Image (cartoon, rainbow, N blue to C red):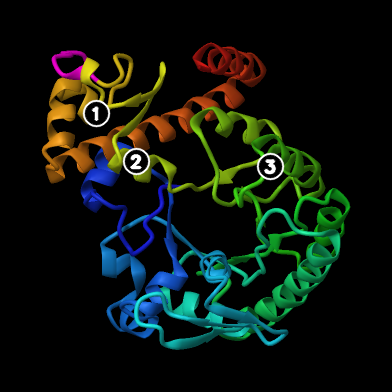
Amino acid sequence: MPVGTQATVKGLTPKQLLDEIDPPIILSNTYHLYLRPGHETVRSLGGLHRFMNWPRPILTDSGGFQVFSLSELRKITEEGVRFQSHLDGSSHMFTPESAVDVQVALGSDIAMVLDECLPYPATRAEAKLSTDRTVRWAGRCFSRFREVADPERHALFPIVQGGMYSDLRAACVNDLLALDAPGYAIGGLSVGEPRPLSLEMVEVTAPLLPRDRPRYVMGVGLPSELPEYVARGIDMMDCVLPSREARTGRLYTSEGRLVIKHAQYREDPRPADPVCGCYTCRNFSRAYLRHLFLASEMLYSTLATIHNLHHYLDIMRRMREAIRSGTFSSYLKGIRASAVQQEP
């Protein structure tokens, strides 16, 4: 899912997103939209879809990750989490109930429960306390959801936590299955842990989740990692990496990552990726992209974001085709071999 944090995928119009990227669903952020422009403002203007003119599904995260990343500006209690706005220092409170209320007001298709996202490393005792609280909060979220949401219009996913302890994650899954949710997320990854450990936690968690419902890993990953998560049973992923890296001059290609500011591209007439069919690669050279980047032209961010998101979504399309044709195993072998060759 491309990330549209503030009701926009940075650098792109909705038409560009539809025509050039064609994502079936995008993600927006509850924390940021709650603070600005405010969920009631979005509700009064017809909800997120109308507000940002996006005709396809939207998933909103609960804001938990953003709040818990404000370690100096928040306090966690059983009731919820009190935090200071990074914008003006004002005090706010997220509870499991209010997290649901805000997302219903935003009108997202898939909402997420409020969870506690631990940093890495965390002790087992810290992880146990946090995971137990996440389970209790999930129950409160679902109780509130049944009161205020239309289940034909909205879905609510719980989030599996447990730090880097496989038995805590298994216990968390067991507790969350009682909610009979339409989908389940795996959270608490990409928080500073080694990448192999992230994959290990998914490998032990995903098989415990229902096979007939979407399984979503939050906040991952590099292009070469996407097939690894899918191989472990994952259906959905999101990551700011393709759009953020695009804006800072890093393009993902079939040959590895390309840093466009390097002098070797000053007169390079080739597209960023010769095998890519995106608008950027069909029409512009590496030399032109480098010129735009060094000149701080806004067009650079648009063209680079189109390319990186197209590259990510193209990986997802190829995986779907491989799964349908029964060739995913050989596809995965090819991806792993290519990743080894591209290592510095």
Q: Is residue 254 left or right of residue 167?
A: left
Residue at image x 28%, y 45%? 17
Q: Nearer the viewer, residue 282 or 127?
A: 127
State the CA–CA distance, disc 1 to disc 3: 31 Å
Q: Residues within 10 Å of mark 1 (few under 14, many from 20)?
A: some
Residue at image x 81%, y 42%? 204
Q: Which mark is residue 22?
A: 2
Which mark is nearer the camera, 1 or 3? 1
Which mark is nearer the camera, 1 or 2? 1
Q: Nearer the viewer, residue 72 or 60?
A: 72
Vertical side of 206 occupied by 271: above or below: above
Amino acid type shown at disc 2? Asp
Vertical side of 267 occupied by 6: above or below: below
Vertical side of 144 occupied by 65: above or below: above
Q: Residues within 10 Å of mark 2 (few under 14, many from 20)?
A: some
Q: Which residues are magenta?
A: 265-271
Tell me where residue 86 appears, x and y as whole percent.
40, 75
Which mark is nearer the camera, 3 or 2? 3
Tell me where residue 130 appears, x and y as whole percent.
76, 69
Residue that mark 3 sits on: 198
Q: Which mark is residue 261?
A: 1
Residue 109 forms part of the magenta stretch:
no
Among the two numbered marks 1 and 2 on one chain, the one whose residue lies closer to the N terminus? 2
Among the two numbered marks 3 and 2 on one chain, the one whose residue lies closer to the N terminus? 2
